[in-house]
Amino acid sequence: MPQGDKSAYTDKQKRKAAHIADGYEERGVPEKEAEARAWAAVNKDSGGGNLSGSGPGKPDTDASSHEGGKQAAGRSAAEKSAAAKKGWETRRKNGSG
């Protein structure tokens, strides 16, 4: 199978990649880059194509779709609280809170 061949992927995986690529393109990512990112996400979720051999295949993990919102994960509760208090003080001083 040549590199880039998508024949080993299920229809569901192909639809998923197309949907992800559309989302990237809507956010201004070039088409080729969007497609590459989409297939990377599909591969991360499912471990690659599922058509070889018989049997149920491997379940999708949906790992890539659970990565959003982790920006503050490296901060402690005290740091998050301090940031919230600072924001509150700023809004109170500016009269917008």
Image (spheres, grey):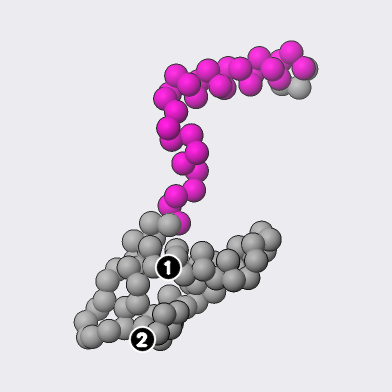
Question: Which residue is denoted by mark 1 in the rendering?
Answer: 42
Q: Residue at x 35, y 68 (%)?
A: 46
**Relative depth, front residue between 65 and 95:** 65
Q: In this rendered view, identify the residue nearer to me: 95 or 64.
A: 64
Question: Residue 64 bears which disc, if any?
Answer: none
Left-right relation of 34 to 17:
right
Q: Which residues are magenta?
A: 65-94
Label 2 crowd bin: few (<14), some (14–19), many (20+), radius 10 Å: few
Residue that numbered label 2 is attached to: 1
Q: Is residue 51 visible?
A: yes
Farthest right residue in view: 95
As shown in the figure, which amino acid type bears the numbered disc 2?
Answer: Met
Residue 92 in magenta?
Answer: yes
Mark before the other along the chain sequence, 1 or 2? 2
| Amino acid at the residue labelled 1 | Val
Q: Residues within 10 Å of mark 1 (few under 14, many from 20)?
A: many
Res 93 → quadrant: top right
In which quadrant is the N terminus drawn? bottom left
Q: CA distance from mark 1 to mark 2?
A: 18 Å
Magenta stretch encompasses residue 24: no
